[in-house]
Image (cartoon, coloured by chain):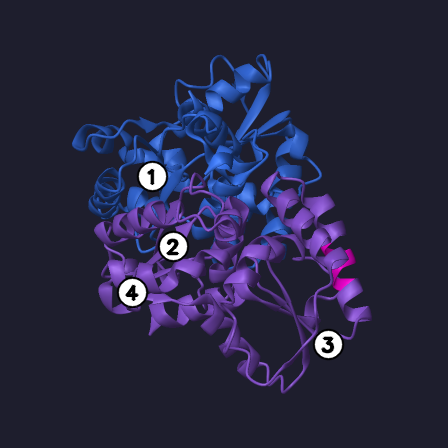
Chain colours: A purple, B blue
Amino acid sequence: MQTQAPASVPARRLGGVLGGMGPMATVNFLTQVIALTRASRDQEHVPLVVHQVPQIPDRSTAILAGSDAPFAPMLEGLRRLAAAGADFAVIPCNSAHHWYDRLANSQPLKILHIADAVSSEIKLRAITSPRLAVLATRGALRSGIYAGRLGDARMVTVEEAAQQLIDQAIAAVKAGQQPLAARLAEQAVEQLMAAGAQTLILACTDLSVALQDSAHRTRCIDSTMALARLCVAESTG
Amino acid sequence: MQTQAPASVPARRLGGVLGGMGPMATVNFLTQVIALTRASRDQEHVPLVVHQVPQIPDRSTAILAGSDAPFAPMLEGLRRLAAAGADFAVIPCNSAHHWYDRLANSQPLKILHIADAVSSEIKLRAITSPRLAVLATRGALRSGIYAGRLGDARMVTVEEAAQQLIDQAIAAVKAGQQPLAARLAEQAVEQLMAAGAQTLILACTDLSVALQDSAHRTRCIDSTMALARLCVAESTG
């Protein structure tokens, strides 16, 4: 058909999304990919194949318990994405990156690392040596996936009271209680700003959902948006 | 791990989503699936594999031109979903159902029909013989995918002026212009209500996006929500 002549459709590489961790975080990721793509019609958008399988065991719980339970189903998911023709993969879940090296080495797909995406976003926004706070699950913090990726930033310690609010906000997103999640996450952000944080790294994709309409949005580096930007760049080349 | 003991995770069938038509319509579908699922944590949500490939040629244009161009890539997409392990499939695009019979007969996956979902939704909401208006692409209207599925409803004719607003609203969603899409679609709804329509069938999944915050939402039967409800039921048995 004339309107879909091959010459008018730009080349796009097929992105594989290992999702469902949690489900709303994946939907938010897909929304950000669309928002960050220059497109005036369907055919110009980024093609993706998405494994939205929330049955993967909780990543943070597993890291804290020293359990390897999420690894096998995540690897299986990546293999399904490869079988479906994906050219590369993303995992819109920070805690899942605890298993990044083994996942990358156990199957053929290149995986874009979410902390590399955040690091690029910090450079893009020209944030120099700010006082940063990392909002994440306890598992992701234990795993240290951001270690060595945030340059010489001075880090603000997340106190137990703020971490409890973060934990509860994440659980509320997973339970579909968005207004509660927003309220809890906003309280955590305010405590961290009172403690001196100038920039907040939303290093949990469920927190990206909780804080999507936050009054402090401009102070946040959103790992979901950062990964979406990297994914669009990788697909459109 | 104790918290993910098999007994605590309900059985779920893997739904395959042939998406990208358009991309935001698929994201809206995924959001509705999550909203319609009873879940307090990730693992209770519906597992899906999603083929978000917007490169499939425009369905409405093809129907009007007598072109078969969308069929082969849609069939290919369904085969990829089957290869990825899907137990059944849904297509959150009304116009695509022009090819429903051939798609259903050309590959192994059972496909839930979006017009059957709308028909179920009308029964669920106990709407009896209302004055209905069907808001759809010109291609879907030509194809008649709702013919024979809306009972003895009295249909309100969609005049050319309203259809033009509908066409423009759909194009605006595909171009990422959500506020414009909402304004145009709302005008179409108001013209149809002035012409006597009591219930509006949103028979285009891009219109579901355009009218998601509509003042007239309670008068709408949303094909995206209807298909999501059917998909959750099929997955959770």
| Residue designated by label 3 | A198
Q: CA distance from mark 4 to mark 1?
A: 24 Å
Instruction: Using the rendered image, report if marks 3 and 2 lie on a common chain.
Output: yes
Magenta stretch, residue numbers: A185-190
| Residue designated by label 1 | B96
- Based on the picture, tell me whether residue A189 belongs to the magenta stretch: yes
Query: Element type at marker 3?
Result: loop
Q: Vertically, is B11 above or below B180?
A: above
Q: What x and y, as percent, mark residue A42?
A: 40, 56
The residue sitting at 78% across, 75% down in the picture is A196
Instruction: Using the rendered image, report if marks 4 and 1 lie on a common chain.
Output: no
The residue sitting at 60% across, 60% down in the picture is A136
**Residue A17's disc number:** 2
Q: CA distance from mark 3 to mark 2?
A: 31 Å
Q: CA distance from mark 4 to mark 2?
A: 13 Å
Query: Element type at marker 4?
Result: loop
Which of marks 2 and 3 precedes in the sequence? 2
Quarter of the image that includes the N terminus of chain A: bottom left
**Considering depth in this image, is B110 or B4 the residue closer to the camera?**
B4
**Residue A13's disc number:** 4
Marks 3 & 1, CB-CB < 8 Å contact: no
**Considering depth in this image, is A182 or B183 the residue closer to the camera?**
A182
